[in-house]
Image: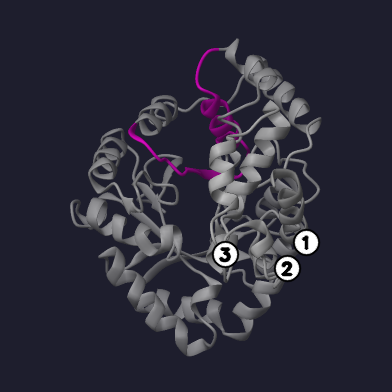
Amino acid sequence: MEKIKKNFGFGFMRLPMIGDEVDYDQICRMVDAFLEAGFNYFDTAHGYIDGKSEIAIRRCLTSRYPRESYVLTNKLSANYFEKPEDIRPLVDQQLQACGVEYFDFYLMHAQNKELFAKYKACRAYETALELIREGKIRHLGISFHDKAVVLDRILTEYPQVEVAQIQLNYVDMDDPIVESRKCLEVCRKHNVPAIVMEPVKGGKLVNLPRLAAAALDELGGSHASYAIRYAAGQPGVFMTLSGMGSMEMVRDNVGYMQNFVPLNEKEMAAVQKVRNIFASMDTIECTDCRYCVETCPRKIPVPKFFAMMNSKKMWGSWNRDFANRLMNEPGQSPDSCLGCGDCEAMCPQHLPIRRLLKMVEETLR
């Protein structure tokens, strides 16, 4: 961990796109600006952007900078292995895709009670520890989406885990489903440094409803700055990630994270106002991670439908032309759902996606 320069990382999950293709030219400029500002932590996974994230890492980072100049995290995702002997070839494929000989951090991805059982049955943790001894991985970690009691169990059974990536933002801090505060307390109990994902809750804490935005606009600064600084200022957090999708996001984020200062009392009070406003709204807590789309046999664009429903609840309207195009896409409308439940098994927010899709169909149709 000695290579890490600052407490802010670049998540390669929501990259700028040109149609269906990654905008490599813009990402190169983003990577350059990020490194020039003194940051060096990058995060990817095999399934991000249908496999294009790892390729972007190679084209925009690892082929352009010496290995010692950056810290790279990758993950072992459950939908890419079924038995123990699948894991090593997958890791080798990931190393090749990223253009490196080792990963600084390798995380057991999206751990919850059910997936942890699969990882144990496939000896995934044990294989990762072997790969550390072989030099292909430097540090073992997990990314986590479940109750704090499950996190406590994992860290107890595998004390070799060195970092835990948890979902944390000022809205989810005391949410009974996400349990951000309790999960952070478990990390501290086990002396495991926490990496924060979703500090802006998939953009929800950037594109705020009017009343919530007013509470922060009085202070100046971007809405993202308060969310990311809130997360980074929590005790036990050593890295906060942002899935940056434009050069503007990079400039904004590095501007206030270069000389990081936790939220002061006035800023914390404004954030509490925003929390109270969100608590009074009945929105779908989707973060647009797209795990549901990746696992869906029909590739139904679930986050887009949920975003339209939230827009209707928050603003009283939605883009009707866009809704009509989505609703009439053959095989991808909400009523195309097969009811298999694969999406719900992967959802970090534990959303009842099948029931919500029926609600979307009834509302938007």
Q: Quadrant of the N terminus?
A: bottom left
Q: Position of residue 359 (x, y in %)?
A: 77, 50
Q: Position of residue 62 (x, y in %)?
A: 24, 56
| Foreground disc of the pair 2, 3 | 3
**What amino acid type should be assigned to the residue bearing mark 2?**
Arg
- Taking the image as shown, residue 172 lies to the left or right of residue 202, namely right
Mark 1 highlights which residue? 149
Query: Which numbered disc flags the more N-terminal residue, 1 or 3?
Result: 1
10 Å crowding of disc 2: few (<14), some (14-19), many (20+) = few
10 Å crowding of disc 1: few (<14), some (14-19), many (20+) = few
Specify the label residue 186 is tagged with.
none
| Foreground disc of the pair 1, 3 | 3
- Secondary structure at numbered mark 1: helix
Query: Disc 2 versus disc 3: distance between alpha carbons?
Result: 41 Å
Q: Residue at x 54, y 33 (%)?
A: 228
In the image, is residue 242 part of the stretch drawn in magenta?
A: yes
In the image, is residue 23 part of the stretch drawn in magenta?
A: no
- Secondary structure at numbered mark 3: loop
Height in image: 80 above or below 195?
below
Q: Could one spot residue 287 in this view of the protein?
A: no
Mark 3 highlights which residue? 331
Query: Disc 1 versus disc 2: distance between alpha carbons?
Result: 6 Å
**What amino acid type should be assigned to the residue bearing mark 3?**
Gly
User: Which of 97/308 is in front?
Assistant: 308
Examine the image and state in which quarter residue 106 appears.
bottom left
User: Which of 286/299 is in front?
Assistant: 299
Q: Residue at x 26, y 59 (%)?
A: 58
Query: Which stretch is magenta?
Result: 220-247
Mark 2 highlights which residue? 153
